[in-house]
Amino acid sequence: MAKVVMLRRLGGPEVLQFEDVRIEDPREGEVRIRVQAIGLNRSEAMFRAGRYPVQPQLPTRIGYEASGVIEAVGPGVAVWKAGDAVCVIPNYRLGTYGVWAEQAIVPAASLVAAPPGLSMIEAASIWMQYFTALAIIEGAQATLDDYVVIRAASSSVGLAAIQLANWAGAVSIAATRTSAKREALQKLGAQHVVATEEVDYVAEIQRITNGKGARIVFDPVGGPFVEKLAESMSPRGILFIYGGLSEQATPYPHWQSAFKGLSIRGWVASEIWNHPQRFERHKTIILQGLARGKLKPVIARTFPLDEIVEANRYLESNQQVGKIVVTVQ
Amino acid sequence: MAKVVMLRRLGGPEVLQFEDVRIEDPREGEVRIRVQAIGLNRSEAMFRAGRYPVQPQLPTRIGYEASGVIEAVGPGVAVWKAGDAVCVIPNYRLGTYGVWAEQAIVPAASLVAAPPGLSMIEAASIWMQYFTALAIIEGAQATLDDYVVIRAASSSVGLAAIQLANWAGAVSIAATRTSAKREALQKLGAQHVVATEEVDYVAEIQRITNGKGARIVFDPVGGPFVEKLAESMSPRGILFIYGGLSEQATPYPHWQSAFKGLSIRGWVASEIWNHPQRFERHKTIILQGLARGKLKPVIARTFPLDEIVEANRYLESNQQVGKIVVTVQ
């Protein structure tokens, strides 16, 4: 029997319940893993609350990013064997499998060998953040003379984007609501930090970019501030909106977009991992970045599995800088 | 003395007044032309009404697209001479010059020789429409396996986009509000016509594209219908919004954009003509298209200059199919 987090109703963190479940044997194309660490994602919190585009089929297991060790492989799985240390890439639809548990069945197609040199806690944190942040490379070719504004910069994806922008030779500008995380962001690589609630955002970006504007903006929030983001961009800029954290509707910034030829661009990591060639290329980039020290996962805090409710509350408190990881045993 | 349309207050077509003005001599880099035909544009109507991003400095002349014959050239103008038949490309800021007149001063940098084989009426109609519609080539590389939806398809820019999409080997789909203009649009090259107020738009696009969706959408309207446009698009599609005709705000179609990686892209023709290389390339494409019969301007109706008010009313009535041209003398 294994302890498994089960969702029987939608709502806040308190709806998460533990159940003792006998984990089935892996079927064709699946493996069973003993989970060692779980990376938490905003999408899971939205799924739990019923605010995700995919509605949960209750009751459901939950969670799709983890590290662990393979216990058993199903028919047709040739690449993996029991004892392998692996990461689970969150490339399947939320709710079809669930890794918030001591043991879990996952698709073999979602596995990557745990990268050398990383702890299992770090190994549970890397794939969603780097695959998502690679938008600035894959979708906008960030390069030497670019300014890249990263909103919600202290999130795991935000920090991943700072690292990727710096690696690509661009100037990373962290946008964060207040000055509270300024020093932390600077230590973690942000070349500039703009506290959006404390300064005239557009003027500040103009100052930092010497009037050029930011060619790339990477934003998980949306909402009315998108008008300001657009105003601070250079001609033919690309504004990625990769999440919908704002409670307010996102306006399309018409005139700014028209006169500067801006693109407002949706992005989800599945755009990469649903395409085998892009997936392999990005996986290689990420592994090289980790090996060469260009990418370094930032763990905000760990919680034991028993405290999954507290871990979810912490995720939604916006206090963290980096990834929240839940450890098992 | 020349008859000149003057704007002394903002408002509907009735605010347009004629005044007899002695047209000055051309200064450095300018020429004076005797206007023969004037192409009307939506941007001029918005400017007149005070709904354009550039506010008129009253009183002001108005109008920026025309054909005519050069009467005099200013200092430093070497390429042109009196007697040349020319087009005025609307590549200057509205209100800085004004061609709704019998005679007008214009910048030499806005001139192109009147293309052979076109009447002066046609010559006054081509530049804004083709430069704008070239978005589908320059910004989205429309090609053989593409479906291109063109909203407000019976406008001059819409018809230009149909011609360009067909020339590029793509499938043109005209979106128009009702069936009233269906036959006209088919005759003018639309491979499919969708009456957006009469059918389930998304289902109809799915049917036409065999479930693939449109990769390119070209829309001067914006507003809430953008959600439907996004829903009917294929992954990595590009939705150009090149005008703001809707009275309602344009929402950003967040989830559609995220899951399909759509780009919502602003576009104005100045994105091309403010860049010398793009300008030359597009000018050449347009002249070749005209010469080879791939592009053919469609004149909805002509009005004499005396009826400039009626011509403006007709522009805003949405009855036209093609360009409205005002003739002088």
Image (tube, coloured by chain):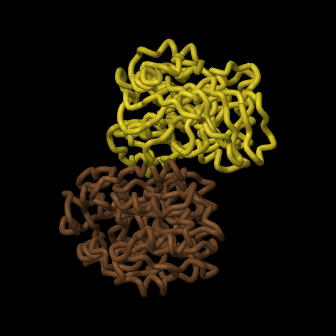
Chain colours: A yellow, B brown
Q: Quadrant of residue B315?
A: bottom left
Asked whether residue A47 is in view, the answer is yes
Asked whether residue B61 is in view, the answer is no
- Residue at (51, 35) in percent of width and height: A214
**Image coords of residue B217 (percent x, y):** 49, 63
Which of A55 and A206 lies nearest the eye of the viewer?
Answer: A55
- Residue at (64, 22) in percent of width and height: A122
Examine the rendered structure and indicate whether residue A207 appears above or below residue B317. Answer: above
Which of B41 and B89 lies nearest the eye of the viewer?
Answer: B41
**Image coords of residue A217 (percent x, y):** 51, 36
**Image coords of residue A279 (percent x, y):** 69, 44
| Count of residue discs | 0
**Image coords of residue B56 (percent x, y):** 28, 52
Residue A170 located left or right of residue B131:
right
Examine the rendered structure and indicate whether residue A283 appears above or below residue B66. Answer: above
Examine the rendered structure and indicate whether residue A13 appears above or below residue A117. Answer: below
Which of A170 and B224 lies nearest the eye of the viewer?
Answer: B224
Quadrant assignment for the C terminus of chain B: bottom left
Q: Residue furthest right?
A: A78
- Residue at (44, 45) in percent of width and height: A56
Examine the rendered structure and indicate whether residue B248 appears above or below residue B306. Answer: above
Residue A107 located left or right of residue A176:
right
- Residue at (43, 62) in percent of width and height: B229
Q: Quadrant of residue A227?
A: top left
Which of A146 and A158 lies nearest the eye of the viewer?
Answer: A158
Quadrant assignment for the N terminus of chain B: bottom left
